[in-house]
């Protein structure tokens, strides 16, 4: 396999990569970096966690370092657009670590932070700006920056930006950037609208695809547990209680549902926090910092975190609600088994979610083994897990709404005659 030394990168970047313990490029890096160094437009198709930030960041920084002079006030040499604050923050952290000691000014602008502070920082000129589309448009309307000198444009997780509804914002921003720029577009999937976006943004691009859409990391063990919607909370508590002290991400479809589940788990004694679009930037950053440091073991999130969360210590992902966009399942469970580690993902499937499950399995071209419950009527069963991994028969409904004793830390009592029934999570799940 190639190493970074022969990819044409700036010496100071190679020095920083060695200090970070990075010596061998990933496939997207090995194939993409030489093309970007040569100035080619690039269409990169790869799942999250494959090293895309370094794939576009290292060659872009190499070319910017070669300028040898500071950018003019309010100008931006390279613009990186990301769909969420979390991903923008992750890109900023990575590029900053790559460029330590280099004469490069890297800035980020995201919603939820002080726009006045951001305006002041941009006034001095920026080499690399990482931004979410909405906040960037706010700053452009305030004339806090200009894009007339921008030579590099990166659209990261472009398919998610389309899902969120940023297509019109992207078109407005692109019109402000010179046509002779170098453009790099990265996406995990390639729907028809993405093909159209690529055709309009890229000029004679090199196409690099390192994994087919829907492919899951090999080190993720997946299961599906069939249950009723009202039983999911107690079932989740049982699973969490089997792995105290291990980090887990729980995905919920809605903001309200995430808050409701977080409060319930907190009442049951779990160390839990939540992030979603209604949280302020400070709240989201604080929640992620506590989770990353292990001060909180459970993070309840909507899909806002599915592609921007890079915490190697995450051991478990629970799909409390199945996503209605099947590709999002792959991104969600990709929050575990990072940095060479193993991970586990359990999906809770209620009767109303059987079509979602079938769509997910079709996208992955694979059946998810059953670890608990029985497939709901009217839908063919997936191949079951080995008998020893199946859950035992569900017992009677509990008398109070709480996780089972012995499976949770210092749970607080919470009464209620309409408590959900629960299935016992297997000990090795």
Image (spheres, rainbow, N blue to C red):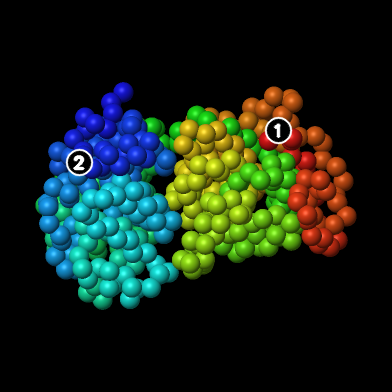
* Image side of residue 240 versus residue 285, left or right: right
Asked if residue 220 is positioned above or below residue 294 in the image, the reply reads above
Give percent across and percent down for residue 248: 60, 46
Label 1 SS: loop
Asked if residue 220 is positioned above or below residue 316 in the image, the reply reads above
Q: CA distance from mark 1 to mark 2?
A: 47 Å
The number of numbered badges drawn on the structure is 2
Q: Quadrant of residue 268?
A: bottom right
Evaluate whether residue 390 shows in this view. Answer: yes
Task: Determine which residue is flagged by label 1.
Answer: 428
Q: Quadrant of residue 170?
A: bottom left
Evaluate whether residue 56 shows in this view. Answer: no
Residue at point 54% right, 48% down? 323
Front disc: 1 or 2: 2
Camera-nearest residue between 124 and 255: 124
Task: Determine which residue is flagged by label 2.
Answer: 10
Sequence order check: which comes first, mark 1 or mark 2? 2
Camera-nearest residue between 236 and 96: 96
Residue at point 52% right, 56% down? 288
Q: Quadrant of the N terminus?
A: top left
Dot 2 alpha-carbon crowd within 10 angstroms: few under 14, some 14 to 19, many 20 or more: some
* Image side of residue 329 versus residue 196, left or right: right
Give percent across and percent down for residue 263: 68, 62
* Image side of residue 423 versus residue 379, left or right: right
């Amino acid at each position: 396999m190639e190493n970074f030394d022969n990819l044409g990168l700036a010496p100071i970047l190679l020095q920083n990569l060695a200090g970070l313990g990075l010596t061998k490029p990933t496939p997207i890096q090995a194939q993409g970096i030489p093309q970007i160094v040569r100035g080619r437009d690039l269409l990169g198709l790869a799942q999250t966690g494959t090293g895309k930030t370094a794939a576009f960041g290292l060659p872009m920084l190499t070319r910017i370092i070669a300028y040898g002079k500071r950018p003019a006030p309010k100008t931006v040499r390279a613009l990186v657009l990301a769909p969420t604050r979390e991903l923008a923050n992750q890109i900023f952290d990575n590029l900053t670590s790559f460029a330590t000691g280099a004469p490069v000014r890297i800035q980020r602008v995201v919603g939820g932070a002080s726009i006045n502070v951001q305006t002041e920082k941009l006034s001095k000129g920026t080499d690399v700006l990482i931004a979410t589309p909405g906040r960037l448009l706010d700053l452009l309307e305030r004339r806090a920056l200009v894009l007339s000198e921008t030579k590099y444009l990166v659209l990261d997780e472009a398919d998610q930006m389309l899902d969120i509804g940023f297509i019109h914002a992207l078109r407005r921003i692109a019109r402000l950037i010179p046509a002779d720029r170098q453009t790099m577009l990265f996406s995990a999937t390639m729907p028809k609208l993405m093909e159209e976006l690529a055709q309009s943004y890229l000029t004679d691009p090199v196409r690099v695809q390192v994994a087919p859409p829907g492919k899951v990391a090999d080190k993720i063990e997946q299961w599906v547990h069939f249950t009723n919607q009202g039983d999911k909370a107690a079932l989740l508590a049982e699973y969490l209680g089997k792995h105290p002290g291990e980090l887990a991400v729980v995905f919920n479809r809605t903001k309200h549902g995430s808050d409701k589940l977080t409060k319930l788990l907190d009442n049951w004694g779990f160390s839990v926090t939540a992030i979603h679009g209604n949280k302020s930037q400070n709240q989201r950053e604080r929640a992620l910092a506590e989770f990353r440091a292990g001060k909180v073991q459970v993070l309840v999130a909507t899909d806002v975190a599915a592609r921007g969360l890079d915490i190697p210590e995450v051991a478990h992902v629970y799909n409390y609600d199945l996503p209605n966009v099947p590709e999002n399942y792959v991104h969600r469970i990709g929050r575990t088994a990072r940095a060479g580690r193993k991970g586990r993902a359990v999906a809770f499937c209620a009767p109303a979610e059987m079509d979602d499950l079938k769509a997910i399995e079709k996208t992955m071209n694979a059946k998810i083994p059953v670890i608990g419950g029985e497939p709901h009527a009217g839908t063919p069963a997936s191949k079951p897990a080995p008998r020893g991994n199946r859950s035992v028969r569900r017992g009677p409904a509990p008398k109070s709404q709480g996780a089972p004793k012995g499976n949770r830390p210092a749970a607080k009592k919470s009464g209620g005659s309409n408590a959900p029934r629960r299935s016992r999570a297997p000990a090795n799940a």
